[in-house]
Image (cartoon, helix red, strand yellow):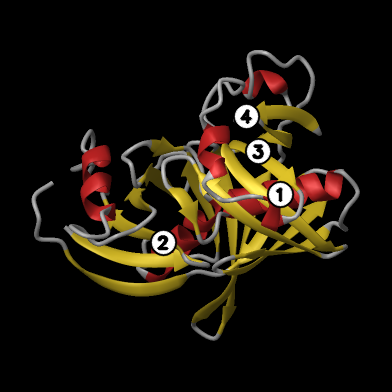
Amino acid sequence: MNFKKMHGNGNDFIIIEDLNNEYLGKEGNIALKLCNRNFGIGADGILIVRNSKEADVEMVIINSDGSYASMCGNGIRCFAKYVYEEKIVEKTIINIKTGDGIKKVSLTLKGDNIEEITVYMGKPSLDPNNISEVSEKPIINKPLEINNKLYIINSLHLGVTHTVIIDKLSNYKIEEGKFIEENSFFKIKTNVNFCEVLDRKSIKIKTWEVGAGPTLACGTGSCASAYISYMLGYTDNEISVIVEGGTLKVRIEDGDNIYMIGNAENVFKGTLLMEY
């Protein structure tokens, strides 16, 4: 099995091609082996390249624990760079099929190199029915007590479910995200973003991701945090999101159209010899 390892702001992925559907039904087991940082390559997840009838190409995302993810912001930038550089899709505007529908990705070139990648992430959903079975109203500034600690949560769906807590980052340990992720208030597990507003144009976040735990960056989490910060009036519509692995830019147009701007980096490529 040939692979390439890439990262977006430290959120790392292993990309493999499966244009002939050779790995169908084996994705979870492959991810568990490849993502193991001691016995495999090591990554937060794998991205599988498949053919698509509806779009230019399909991206399948599997978390490091073997679970499926419908969308990944850092992952889709890595994926777009990969399919362009490997000449699987030879154009700079790429329609990529994901579990959250078709995403439009635009590549900005400088010479032959990709300088910037812009992803239209779509519109967030605040519909509580997508998030919780016990809430009839949008989950905005809602108190939630877990382990005798009060959290003020804001939850939305942006490809995957995200919960944003706006406060000083020093007030939280990233491991608290696990208890929020698994709380019975949520219909399905939620990603958790601890978000500190620095000024009108910048925020800083730390994310606990479903299926991966703490990561150096989360693209959908950055977009969710930027949107909540903007919606609550803390920031302008163009926001720099500082994560542990770098900085992403998020732009919000017409109130709720979210664009993520960043890049992706190649790390290494090779051939996997282990059985899967």
Residue highlighted by disc 1: 225
Answer few, some or many: residues within 10 Å of disc 3's Cα (few below 14, many 20 plus, some between 14 and 19). many
In the image, what residue type sits under mark 4? Ile
Answer few, some or many: residues within 10 Å of disc 1's Cα (few below 14, many 20 plus, some between 14 and 19). many
- Indicate which disc, 3 or 2, sits on the residue closer to the N terminus: 2
Residue found at x 50% / y 39%: 178
- Indicate which disc, 1 or 3, sits on the residue closer to the N terminus: 3
Q: Is residue 140 visible?
A: no
Q: CA distance from mark 1 to mark 3?
A: 8 Å
Q: Which element is circle 3 on? A: strand
Residue contact at pointers 4 and 2, CB within 8 angstroms: no
In the image, what residue type sits under mark 1? Ser
Residue found at x 33% / y 42%: 65
Q: CA distance from mark 2 to mark 1?
A: 20 Å
Q: Residue 146: which numbered mark, if any?
A: 4
Up the image or down, 124 lies above or below 236; here it is above
